[in-house]
Amino acid sequence: MTGSFDSVCSQETPTFLIAELRLYPQFLSVIAAWFHSQRTLGGFVGTLEECERKLAAQFGSDDIPVTYVTLVDGVAVGAASFVYYEFTDKDVVRVPWLTNVFVEPKFRRLGLGNELVAFMEQRAVEMAHRKINLFTVDKRSFYQRRGWCFEYKARLSGSDVDVMSLGLGNA
């Protein structure tokens, strides 16, 4: 890590930088379009403008929700977010959810998605969280290879999803 918000890495993957989106606001519209497109495919409702507003609202906070962007040669090629979901009034402990994990199609299969998820897992540790959750329509095996545990099946906005969790081992 080159700082509390940046990670630079090179191996088989291209040289890349992962940083908070608020440090690169010029990519707000691009990332909002990615997230909106993926959410629409998953059956979620909402407009592109709402997605952009939610992302922009993160710029004034040092807490979750937060979005990180992956850059290769100064170009945004991927992104991921942490959010809090509160499903019931009984949700006392706030557990962050990893969401909106996205890598541009032409940059897939280069290890960038794996690096982005590893970065997000490390950020959760640095933020002193004990656990993180996610839901996925079709990437269960990817996350299981990374040590995530399948918790249960759920139905969200008309789609069947796998809810998964990762224990972080923080005291």
Image (cartoon, rainbow, N blue to C red):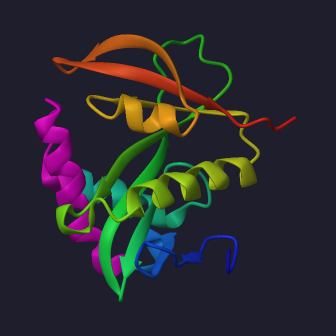
| Residue displayed at 36% across by 20% down | 162
Instruction: Please identify the residue farthest to the front as the structure is shown.
Output: 12
Q: Does 61 lie within the magenta span? A: no
Q: Nearer the viewer, residue 110 or 98?
A: 110
Q: Main secondary structure of the magenta part?
A: helix
| Residue displayed at 47% across by 66% down | 59
- What percent of the width, then of the height, locates residue 105? 18, 61
- What percent of the width, then of the height, locates residue 126? 74, 54
- What percent of the width, then of the height, locates residue 23? 48, 78
Please determine whether, in this image, residue 47 is positioned above or below residue 108. Answer: above
| Residue displayed at 67% across by 19% down | 92
Residue 146 in view, yes or no: yes
Instruction: Please identify the residue farthest to the bottom as the structure is shown.
Output: 73
Side of 114 where 39 appears, left or right: left
| Residue displayed at 55% across by 31% down | 148
The range drawn in magenta is 25-50
Q: Nearer the viewer, residue 164 or 98?
A: 164
Q: Quadrant of residue 53?
A: bottom left
Q: Quadrant of residue 26?
A: bottom left
